[in-house]
Image (cartoon, grey):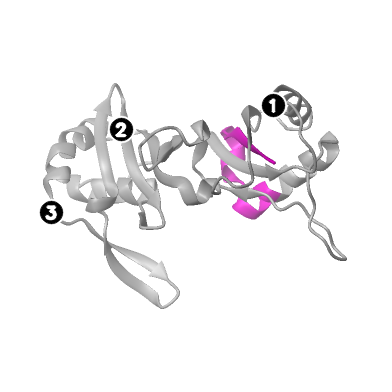
């Protein structure tokens, strides 16, 4: 059995790198006394799996990790014990008990939703959205193992709209291609002809290939 855990990574915790987040979750799980499974060998460790690591500086409202279990435990008990050892703004919001045969959350990922809240030039950015989406290509430079290469952002943008004083977007997040919300914002600013302002980016949901919440399993 394994437990799919929905948790938040908000506030100052958005500056935690992925390795630091892993270590923080491992410490919390060890302190919780939950029946988690450790690897074999001289240096046993928790084999946590995260659906899609967040870039440093981006918040997450419903992040997902999977925890292998040594025995079954109720979802409510798991959630209660884990939250006693987690800090504010990193609390677990839901727990879903799953069979091991279900594909890992990372393999089921299809997309993610984000809310972008720039602190300046919002009217210019909002006005630029229709024309931005009409582009056939939105080239950007991406660093890979072989160095920098040009890629196209446009097919990875499933939706981008203006809502109140924010930009809401749905971006591809899968083995077929992944778009970064900060790269989208940089490209939109360049298209609008403005200097990039500071922007608070929050990932609000992880979705499967049907665009349903990933925690729905």
Identify whether 106 is placed above or below 89.
Answer: below
Pointers 2 and 3 in contact (CB under 8 A)?
no
| Residue 96 seen anywhere in this rendered image of the structure | yes
Horizontal relation, residue 106 to residue 159: left or right: right
For the record, the magenta segment spans 1-22
Q: Residues within 10 Å of mark 1 (few under 14, many from 20)?
A: some
Residue 33: image location, x then y, percent: 85, 36
Give me the residue at 36% from left, 72% from top.
148
Horizontal relation, residue 45 to residue 18: left or right: right
Residue 136: assigned label? 3
Residue 88: image location, x then y, percent: 68, 28
Instruction: Tell which tag, 1 or 2, sits nearer the viewer.
Output: 1
Residue 92: image location, x then y, percent: 65, 30
Q: Residues within 10 Å of mark 3 (few under 14, many from 20)?
A: few
Identify whether 20 is placed above or below 164.
Answer: below
Give me the residue at 58% from left, 45% from top.
15
Residue carrying label 1: 75
């Amino acid at each position: 059995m394994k437990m799919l855990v929905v948790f938040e990574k908000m506030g100052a915790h958005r500056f935690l790198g992925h390795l630091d987040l892993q270590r923080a979750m491992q410490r919390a799980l060890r302190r919780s006394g939950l029946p988690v499974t450790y690897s074999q060998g001289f240096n046993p460790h928790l084999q946590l799996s995260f659906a899609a690591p967040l870039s440093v500086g981006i918040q997450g409202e419903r992040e997902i990790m999977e925890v292998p279990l040594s025995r079954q435990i109720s979802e409510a008990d798991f959630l209660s014990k884990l939250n006693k050892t987690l800090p504010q703004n990193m609390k677990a919001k839901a727990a879903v008990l799953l069979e091991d045969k279900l594909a890992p959350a990372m393999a089921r990922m299809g997309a993610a939703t984000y809310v972008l809240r720039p602190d300046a030039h919002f009217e210019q950015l909002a006005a630029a959205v229709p024309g931005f989406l009409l582009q056939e290509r939105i080239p950007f430079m991406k660093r890979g193992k072989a160095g920098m290469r040009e890629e196209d952002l446009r097919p990875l943008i499933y939706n981008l709209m203006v809502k109140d004083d924010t930009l809401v977007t749905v971006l591809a997040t899968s083995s077929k291609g992944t778009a970064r919300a900060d790269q989208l914002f940089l490209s939109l600013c360049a298209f609008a002809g403005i200097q990039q302002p500071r922007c608070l980016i929050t990932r609000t949901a992880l979705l499967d290939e049907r665009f349903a919440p990933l925690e729905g399993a």
